[in-house]
Image (cartoon, helix red, strand yellow):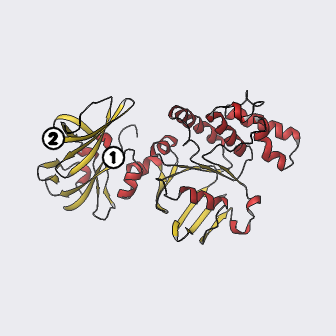
Amino acid sequence: MSLVANNIGLGVDGVAHLDDISCTLERGKFYTVVGPTMAGKTSLLHALAGLNDPDTGTITLAGVDLATVPVWSRSVSMVYQQFINYPHLSVYENIAFPLRRRRLPRAEIDQRVLAIAETVGLGKLLERRPGALSGGQQQRVAIARSLVKRSDLLLLDEPLVNLDYKLREQLREEFLNIFAGQSESIVVYTTADPNEALLFDAEVLVMHEGRLLQVGPAQEVYASPATTAVAQIFSDPPMNLLPATLDETGLRLADDVRLPRAPHLHALPPGPYVLGIHPGDVALDPAGLTAEVELAEISGSETFLHVRHAEMTFVAHLSRVHTHAEGENVQIALDPERTFLFTPDGKLAAAPAPASGG
């Protein structure tokens, strides 16, 4: 069973929310749709679910054009950002609700509810009402209600975005196990966080401004972003992009900044390029170039150091806490073995070999 979206276009009040989207999604696979706010992620889910009819193109599931299938009869489940549960019903009845509407036998309802409740960690909370649960437990109820239907298509629209950081981290790990068992469904999960997509390590669809930019396994997209737009979207913090010129001896970034020509760049012709480097490959180094600190962001045990050298600005992602005052000078080194080169129009020209360990 496959879901095929072919040249989907969708506009609202003259603004394009989806622009010529084509993709094929296979049963038993988990897909992560990644993109910033207003990328079109939710619009895509709504189109797949039938909540918004596309202006152009077709969506077929198992060869059937979904435009010919009433929304209420489609085999689709959706989990939203907000916890949508019935406050007057117990956890058990919330999960059982779609099965009761189908008038399934009581024994089958009980078996399916108990099984999915154990899967999502609600087995001991079935008699409680949603108001007595934590935010994470309420989201588990919504997810369980979607899973218990055993739909052909399971859509999750940033389901963790409204939870606190620690709870998001916990549920991300649990989701790897929860969705691993959905071999009969196509699972589509949206997020604005590329690290979440890398954690799931599934097929990703990178979106921006209603367009689908790249599709592929998460690690491959991270290692070989097709364009500068993908490189920035699928990196947190975004990849540093700097104008550069390649010649026989190496890369020139500024009048006084040169990098040796790494082996993965040897096949490229000389000329202007855009150099890309992940913030994690920018390091403090006493032998590096001098840069001025513009901002030091401390996040837990990490520091995001924003620096400037001449007309170049970039971010270093440093482990541990580094306190640097605005205007302070630091020495920064860029790892030439970890550089990407893009053509002036933003297409990938060369990428380093994937770092060990992914």
| Mark 1 or 2, nearer chain start | 2
- Spatial separation of the CA atoms under disc 1 and disc 2: 28 Å
The residue positioned 15% from the left and 53% from the top of the image is: 254
Asked which secondary structure carries label 1, the reply is loop
In the picture as drawn, the residue positioned furthest to the left comes out as 256
**In the image, what residue type sits under mark 2?**
Thr
The residue positioned 46% from the left and 61% from the top of the image is: 209
Instruction: Tell me where residue 340 appears, x and y as whole percent.
Output: 29, 52
Instruction: Tell me where residue 190 appears, x and y as whole percent.
Output: 55, 50
Can I make out residue 269 in this image?
A: no
Q: In this view, does 123 lie to the left or right of 250?
A: right
Against 204, residue 332 (above or below) is above
**In the image, what residue type sits under mark 1?**
Ala
Against 333, residue 350 (above or below) is below
Q: Is residue 330 left or right of residue 20?
A: left
Q: Which residue corresponds to mark 2?
A: 290
Quadrant in the picture for residue 295:
top left
In the picture as drawn, the residue positioned furthest to the top comes out as 124
Instruction: Tell me where residue 121 appears, x and y as whole percent.
Output: 67, 31
Can I make out residue 60 in this image?
A: yes
Q: Which residue corresponds to mark 1?
A: 353
